[in-house]
Image (cartoon, rainbow, N blue to C red):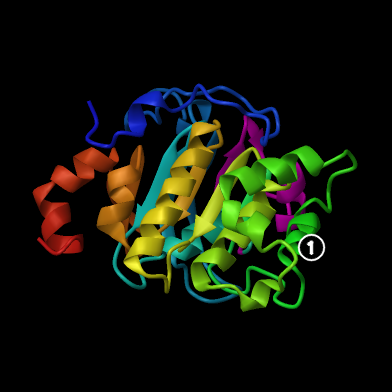
Amino acid sequence: MSDNPYHDDRGNKDRSITKDGGSKSDPVRKSGATKSAADAAFLIGETMTGGYGKGPDILHECTIAVNPGEIAVIVGPNGAGKSTAMKAVFGMLNIHTGRVVLDGEDITALSPQDRVVKGMGFVPQTSNIFTSMTVEENLEMGAFIRRDDFRDTMAQIYDLFPILKEKRYQAAGELSGGQRQQVAVGRALMTQPKVLMLDEPTAGVSPIVMDELFDRIIEVARTGIPILMVEQNARQALEIADKGYVLVQGRNAHTGTGKELLADDDVRRSFLGG
């Protein structure tokens, strides 16, 4: 039984803000299994090696994965390659070896734009809203790939983030840091993603706002959307995580459930302050 009160009732909620995705919920297989981890995971960046442009490799056979209804977090020291791994999965840098598989389809060769169409929602750490546009206009921009009536989705996002409904006609640049992050997440959800990827969603916000954002992230996961998240607040992130990846110098150092990693003496000493 998890210490997290939200864990036990995930995965059976309304999926209406998501695209129809697979239901491959088996855990990623341990090393040595006869089948590829990609056969088990809904989204996986498998044994990725690569870096930016012609520079040196930052990732070294790095593997991260997430399944429907799960929260998977990537943690580690500064410079460990956490955001690089996220960007590699999203197609923002070339990987020399390895692959990215979404819902059974190899998407390694696709551009970030094409990956959005396939069902990836990505929220970067910075520059993730249109500051001169209103909150509602930002959400409308998130529906740019849709050709259907998206008003129901917008209503669901306002239910998830009530403050955004209250401030829907206000310029997004006038909002607090936490409210801006809600706009960014809401805009990504407007695409009805199969998977939501968040790069440092609580960076620069107060502990109270961080807790609120984590609560909202849990609510999104409860709709069935897989969430892959890079997070600097490692202990708090692992407390809500179904799966955790600790990276060191672009390599997988530790992998397990959030609870397992929090209980691991080596992880606590090296990455969580004892």
Query: Within the image, what quadrant is residue 131 found in?
Result: bottom right
Q: Which is more toward the observer, 88 or 144?
A: 144
Residue with the most extreme right position: 147
Q: Taking 44 as reference, is 191 left or right? A: right
Q: Is residue 90 visible?
A: no
Please tell me whether residue 111 belongs to the stretch shown in magenta. yes
Q: Give the image location of residue 249, x and y in percent.
A: 33, 65
Q: Taking 250 as reference, is 145 left or right? A: right
Q: Which is more toward the observer, 74 or 213?
A: 213
Q: Residue at x 52, y 26 (%)?
A: 39
Q: Residue at x 48, y 47 (%)?
A: 216
Q: Taking 92 as reference, is 7 left or right? A: left
Dot 1: element = helix
Q: Is residue 153 visible?
A: yes
Q: Which is more toward the observer, 163 or 112?
A: 163
Q: Residue at x 37, y 28 (%)?
A: 29
Magenta stretch in the rendered image: 93-118
Q: Residue at x 47, y 64 (%)?
A: 83
- In the depicted structure, whether residue 40 falls above or below residue 226: above
